[in-house]
Amino acid sequence: MRKALVIGAAGQIGTELTYRLSEELGTDNVIASDISELYFEDQPNIRTVILDVLDFELLKSTILDNDISEVYHLAATLSANAEKNPGFSWHLNMQSLLNILNLAKEGHISKIFWPSSVAVFGTDTPKENTPQFTLMNPNTVYGISKSAGENWCNYYYEKYGVDVRSLRFPGLLGYKSDPGGGTTDYALWALKNSSNNLPYVSFLSRETTLPMMHMEDAIDGIIQLMNVPNSDIKIRTSYNISSVSFSPTELEKEIQKTIPAFKISYEPDFRQSIADSWPHSIDDSLARNDWNWNPKYNFESLVKNIIEGFKKKVLIVTR
Ligand code: AKB
């Protein structure tokens, strides 16, 4: 019997993943946790608990008392916020992962999902079609923590046989919850403003191209990866996965197909240098080969779907 604990369930990925897991495994087999109280409006039956993932004893008892077999660990400080508080961000992003890896090593969890990010790449990395294996040297606290985390995952797999699986996510775009302190967030705020007939002031410059993905594709990727037989997973650091790439000005043009009056103006801030250190596009051929990764949204359908979602004003999580 599979039983999942989602850590960071009130966040951008956590919200949608919790819903999806409760469809896949049954609501009784999912526990959603976050640092403060959370509530799933559409499915009040989902069990929620308050959990600080840095509290090892509480984490352990939550896992043991609820017979958890798999953990989806999504709690982290994202790129822009991490630059404001490097020490705490390093501690949260690393110690939380180590707590979970150690519980798996002790035999209390059979499978872990942990998201990595395109932030593992840095200014020395080839920008176009960035390969799985290449020069990395991340330039941000968040990127350094994701890169170290990837290596810890691989270490625990190699040394202790811990079944930990990971994806390097690009910017994720969904309408069901707000993003939380990333550099790719500009795109979601632009989409949200446009659907409220408001202009948007971008904190990245007009030509800054970044890899992005619809949240539904990201969730499909997680579910797919977690269902693949152990032996089919060839990469235990983290898989490159990719969908679309665009700049703010390209996004503006695409949004204007639905909302002609929409305009973006530009006031780049400290997040520009973070974005400048990241790839423009990602080569995900190994994920496609090893477990048939294949996202369903293209740029046009992604933009259209998210604007429609925002227009329906779907608000799922309150915290
Ligand atoms: C961020 O911008 O920090 C995240 C990411 C790319 O990991 N969305």
Image: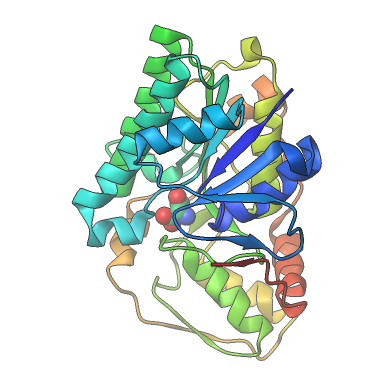
Residue occupying the point 46% across, 59% down: 36
- In the displayed structure, would residue 278 be above or below residue 260? above
The one of 188 and 247 positioned closer to us in this rendering: 188
Residue 216, x across and y down, in percent: 71, 51
The one of 265 and 308 positioned closer to us in this rendering: 308
Query: Left or right: 259 with respect to 141?
Result: right
Query: Left or right: 130 with respect to 88?
Result: right
Residue occupying the point 74% across, 79% down: 311
Query: Left or right: 121 with respect to 112?
Result: left
Residue 288, x across and y down, in percent: 67, 28
Location of residue 83 by image quarter: bottom left
Residue occupying the point 43% across, 64% down: 208
- In the displayed structure, would residue 283 be above or below residue 42? above
The color scheme shown is rainbow
Location of residue 315 by image quarter: bottom right
Residue occupying the point 39% across, 46% down: 119
Residue 39, x across and y down, in percent: 63, 62
The answer to whether any part of residue 135 appears in the image is no
Residue 205, x across and y down, in percent: 40, 72
The answer to whether any part of residue 102 appears in the image is yes
Label total for image = 0
Location of residue 318 by image quarter: bottom right
Q: Residue furthest left?
A: 87
- In the displayed structure, would residue 88 be above or below residue 292? below
The one of 215 and 286 positioned closer to us in this rendering: 215
Quarter containing the N terminus: top right
